[in-house]
Image (cartoon, rainbow, N blue to C red):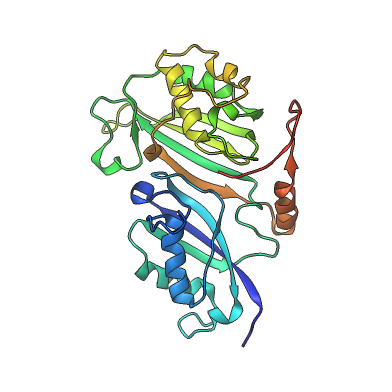
């Protein structure tokens, strides 16, 4: 029997509507993505599986491009239905998992790979409609509704003011000993309206990492500017805050999807993981804090 340990990478997607977020909630038994996946993987592999994920999404948030990994004894893959090939887990899991989770890729992870710490950037899309009728019934799970019309140009200007390396504490729910310094690399608003879906907008948001509720707060702030409730300098002024701002509206969870995670080339995976685990310091900050993820 081979007692060595191997690392397995999962690529997966889920509809977050009926989940209490990604993370297990202690012994509560609440339905979370992590719990459902770990329970099924542990049953198939006959070993306890504990997942590490690229982005720990909140309740109601979806994912089309989530990535996770787990470590397991190599002999767990030697059963006849798998025969040492982790990709065969795709079919097994497809039969077992509920319709709102799909694992579409399973493979041996490359040396040094860590789903969370090797990641270079995360890509999110937020989808929202301002039409008084609301979202199409077929898009009701992934399209939020905003009660007032907005101006796309105003929202884009508000988004542009947030690009770069900043302390986003005004937009984040605080976690002890976790930094709120992030590098926002892209924040682009698009009008994706069609004849059958008028007044629909998407925000494409990319950063090295996001803190708790950050994307939804960024979106909500831009929407407030877009509807005229806040002035054009609102988002830039929030960057000067030293704590979470009560003026920041948090957009509904249902409009948000994690659509991709970028990793460096194979020879840079371990280096990136070590770099991410290290202390991050903001140039104007008096103290440095450990980087936490979503």
Residue drawn where x is 44% and y is 63% of the image: 37
User: For the point 47% across and 17% down, which residue is it?
Assistant: 154
Would you place residue 177 above or below residue 117 in this image? above
Residue 174: % across, % down: 56, 35
Q: Is residue 89 left or right of residue 272?
A: left
Above or below, 52 against 45 in this view is: above
Q: Across the whole image, how many numbered discs are drawn on residues?
A: 0
Residue in the foreground of this view, choosing between 139 and 59:
59
Q: Is residue 83 visible?
A: yes
- Is there any visible trace of residue 153 in the rendered image? no
Seen in the picture, residue 18 relative to 95 is either above or below; the reply is: above
Q: Does 86 sit above or below residue 275?
A: below
Point out residue 77 in the picture as x, y percentages from the top left corner. Answer: 54, 79
**Spot occupied by residue 68 in the image (x, y as percentages of width and height):** 54, 58
Please state the horizontal and vertical placement of residue 145, each as a whole percent of the image: 32, 30
Tell me what residue is drawn at x 48 percent, y 78 percent.
46
Placement of the C terminus among the 4 image quadrants: top right
Please, which residue is most extreme toward the front here?
27
- Is residue 20 left or right of 132 when viewed as pictured? right
Image quadrant holding the N terminus, namely bottom right
Which residue extends farthest bottom?
1
Q: On the rendered structure, is 120 left or right of 9?
A: right
- Residue drawn at point x = 56 percent, y = 51 percent: 54
């Amino acid at each position: 029997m081979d007692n060595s340990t191997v690392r397995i990478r999962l690529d997966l997607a889920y509809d977050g509507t009926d989940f209490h977020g990604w993370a297990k909630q202690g012994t509560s038994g609440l339905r979370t993505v992590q719990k459902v996946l770990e329970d099924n993987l542990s049953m198939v592999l006959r070993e306890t599986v504990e997942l590490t994920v690229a982005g720990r999404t909140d309740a109601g948030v979806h994912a089309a491009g989530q990535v996770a990994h787990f470590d397991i004894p190599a002999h767990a893959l030697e059963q006849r239905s798998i025969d040492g090939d982790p990709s065969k887990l795709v079919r097994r899991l497809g039969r077992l998992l509920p319709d709102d989770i799909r694992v579409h890729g399973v493979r041996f992870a490359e040396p040094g790979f860590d789903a969370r710490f090797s990641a270079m950037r995360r890509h999110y899309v937020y989808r929202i409609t301002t039409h008084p009728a609301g979202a199409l019934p077929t898009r009701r799970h992934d399209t939020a509704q905003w009660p007032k019309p907005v101006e796309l140009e105003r929202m884009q200007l508000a988004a542009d003011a947030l690009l770069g390396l900043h302390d986003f504490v005004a937009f984040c729910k605080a976690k002890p000993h976790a930094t709120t310094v992030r590098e926002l690399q892209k924040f682009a608003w698009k009008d994706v309206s069609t004849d059958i879906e008028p007044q629909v907008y998407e925000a494409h948001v990319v950063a090295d990492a996001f803190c708790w509720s950050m994307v939804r707060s960024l979106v909500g702030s831009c929407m407030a500017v877009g509807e005229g409730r806040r002035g054009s300098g609102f988002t830039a002024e929030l960057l000067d805050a030293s704590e979470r701002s009560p003026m920041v509206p948090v957009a509904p969870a249902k409009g948000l999807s994690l659509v991709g995670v970028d990793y460096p080339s194979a020879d840079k995976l371990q280096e990136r993981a070590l770099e991410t685990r290290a202390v991050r310091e903001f140039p104007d900050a008096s103290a440095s804090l450990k980087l936490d993820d979503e």
